[in-house]
Amino acid sequence: MIGIFSAFGAAISWTYACFIWRSQTEKYKSIDINLVKNIIAFLIFLPAFINLSVLNNLKSIITLLFSGVIGIGLGDTFYIKSLQLIGTRRTLSIETLSPILAALSGEIFINENLAFRSYQGILIISISLFILLRQRTNLIVNNLTNITERNNLSVYVFPFLSVLCAVSGGLLSRKVFLESNLSPFQATEIRLLGAIIFLIIIKKFRINFFLKKLDFNDQKRFLLSILLGTNLGILLQQIVFKTLPLGIGWTLLSTSPVISLFFATKEEGQITKGIIFFTTLLFLGLCLIII
């Protein structure tokens, strides 16, 4: 049960943090937001290294570093960029492809079986997702330009890349937990370290620590988003990977689109009955995967 509760807790934490990060994308680059949040989260979880035996866990540590580079360094950067382009609800809706890829990856690479009914759930998810993506959404950028995105498929490259990177990082984490005794706390910190090293190299060691430029209220909200979305969110995610099969874990983690309905009116205006219906249908498809 701890894995199930952790998954829902991570989904709630991550969803709320997304809306805070979304507000910062109008002023700062997605890679800068990702790097700053990871550095702060890493410093908060620094005690995780106290009892870590590097020599005894060298292979697992290297794997987790790569997991951090792919899942957090690349994945979160693509994710935050997607928040900027298409908004939170649509980004989270596309993220529901992750259990499909996770279930298939788990079956292929670590021998986690995929039941026939899971394919039924995948079909329901695919249909619901296709219809949701065709819903008309008006986005306000920099409070100046009203941009309508309908059939411009190029803007969906970033969320799809985010899904691919997230699942790949999750698969590596799951593999480590199956082969070692590292704790979710330690795994979280190692993955953050991998992401930070990668992003600093990409940025050529130039860090835009924009937090000091924010007013006090925005600083508090951003720090809260780090605690919830990065520290708590990734820690709970690692607990899920340790205790549940990859496909089932990602399915529960992907309840974010339903949770996002409670926040989306602040960002995208009125939520129509069609959006509610197909998002709920999408969620039912996810449930079918784990029955």
Image (tube, grey):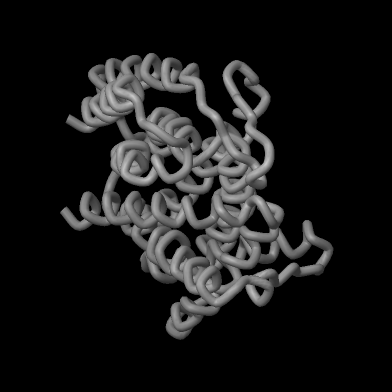
Left or right for 60, reference 177: right
Q: Nearer the viewer, residue 34 or 22?
A: 22
* Residue most extreme to the front: 144
Left or right for 280, reference 71: left
Residue 94 coordinates in the image, percent (x, y): 47, 31
Q: Residue at x 36, y 19 (%)?
A: 128
Q: Is residue 259 above or below residue 213?
A: above
Residue 25: in sight, yes or no? yes
Which quadrant of the figure has residue 122? top left
Residue 132 coordinates in the image, percent (x, y): 42, 21
Which quadrant of the figure has residue 283? top left
Q: Nearer the viewer, residue 87 or 196?
A: 87
Indicate the quadrant containing the C terminus: top left, top right, bottom left or bottom right. top left
Residue 33 coordinates in the image, percent (x, y): 63, 60
Q: Residue at x 36, y 34 (%)?
A: 111
Q: Nearer the viewer, residue 111 or 219?
A: 219
Q: Is residue 92 above or below residue 142?
A: above
Q: Is residue 188 above or below residue 79?
A: below
Residue 249: in sight, yes or no? no
Q: Residue at x 33, y 39 (%)?
A: 261
Left or right for 139, reference 284: right
Residue 286 coordinates in the image, percent (x, y): 28, 29
* Residue most extreme to the right: 204
Q: Residue at x 32, y 52 (%)?
A: 12
Which quadrant of the figure has residue 58? bottom right
Q: Is residue 156 above or below residue 89?
A: above
